[in-house]
Image (cartoon, rainbow, N blue to C red):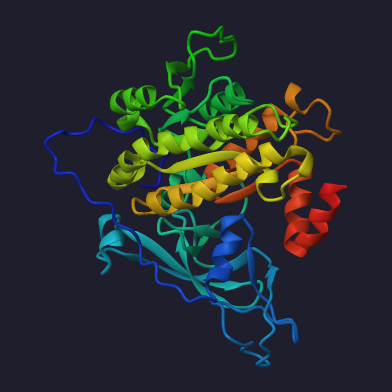
Amino acid sequence: MTGPFPPPGRKNPLTLTRVPLLPPKARSRKAHLLTAAAATGRFALPCCGGCGAFAFPVPEACPVCLSPDLPMTDAPATAVLLSQTVAEVPADSYFRERSPWRVGLVKMDAGPTALVHLHPGCVTGDVVRLSLLLDRAGQAVLHAAPKGNTDMTTDPQWHEMTAHPRHRRVLITDARGFGAAQIAASLKKAGAREVVLGLPEAWKPFDGRGLDGLTVLPLDMGSERSVADFVRDHGHKVEIVVNTADHPRPMAAATPQALREALEAVALGPHRLAAALAPVMVARGADGPYGAAAWVNVLSVHALAPMPAMAVYSAAHATALALSHGLRAQLAAGGVRLANLFAGPLDSPGFQPMPHPKVSAGAVAGAVLNALTRGLEEDAIGDVARDLMQRLAENPKAVERDLRG
């Protein structure tokens, strides 16, 4: 396929259901340094602290001066395509199902020569743009595309390594959640086949303005019956989940009752939905380019950096984060990725006492779309979250002291 990504056809109910296959996933512990970079959208390579030479793949010591000091460093993301070939009958079953598969040999501007997955628009001798992406096994791989403004959706191999919403059906878990309408509009504009918004406690008044052309269905993640009914009737149609569950009382007093309410809304409700829906998504990982692709959680950055004044809110989001790691492992069996997006204070009434800058609904929508189209596993939303995550990587104890005042 080299043209626009086509819409799916009707499934044949008599066709034998395939088992999800994954690309080879064995990697060394050192190689997971590349995985960490790919998960956050960085193009970083090992760079020798002694002589400054970049290396690929990740070695135990610098191939030039043998120094063991090889920190991951942002590298030039361009290269020259030296040669290319098409694997018509690959040995591995995953690639054989998706053949022909294009690969190429590139000479990076950073120095190393590497084998890459190749966009169909690349021509031998051209300068190409490199990306570190996560494949369906969750491991980092190199992908090359033509330099400049390129329609990546024409590349079926890139489609395998991302979760682009084009022609996919999306569930946004809480229609009342912050930014839900903006997320829905953004995904619809990006080509989503259908966007469904779950409506908890449908008996309450709901302002549906801005949801024209979208579907709103009853889904109360606090109810076993509601979740079971939704998954039974609509679970087989869900390819992407965007979990916007929140408890918009971040400054609530740290009482046991407040903690129970926050945990139910932020952690236990989505966990209830995941327990019912995840097995369906795993099974649908074998549906090729139209199968289940991703689960996105919009969480608070205080899941990573608890704030004493927001102890209940921080604990609820930290619990949701912990549960997400189990869900990621479960979804991985079907090649379905899970992304956690960490937001700073939201521009909503619940965060009214907190100082600016705050995160707008549009920023949340943009971050969700960015995570899907780039295949990320983790990202920050807003300046506060970005700053906190950077400082946590440098000195978590200093962040703890700063947040407690």
Q: Residue furthest left?
A: 14
- Residue 139 can be seen in this image: yes
Number of marks in the rendered image? 0
- Residue 130 can be seen in this image: no
Displayed quadrant of residue 137 = bottom left
Q: Is residue 368 above or below residue 324?
A: above
**Residue 348 in the image, given as x and y percentages of width and height:** 73, 24
Q: Residue furthest front?
A: 256
Q: Is residue 208 above or below residue 377?
A: above
Displayed quadrant of residue 7 = top left
**Residue 364 in the image, given as x and y percentages of width and height:** 65, 34
Residue at figure coordinates x 35%, y 23% from the top left: 225
**Residue 258 in the image, given as x and y percentages of width and height:** 64, 30
- Compare residues 288 and 381 and report the one nearer the observer: 381
**Residue 220 in the image, given as x and y percentages of width and height:** 45, 22
Q: Is residue 177 above or below residue 275?
A: above
- Compare residues 121 and 173 and report the one nearer the observer: 173
Residue at figure coordinates x 67%, y 80% from the top left: 70
Residue 39 relative to residue 285: left or right: right
Residue at figure coordinates x 58%, y 70% from the top left: 33
Residue at figure coordinates x 45%, y 29% from the top left: 171
- Compare residues 401 and 10 and report the one nearer the observer: 401
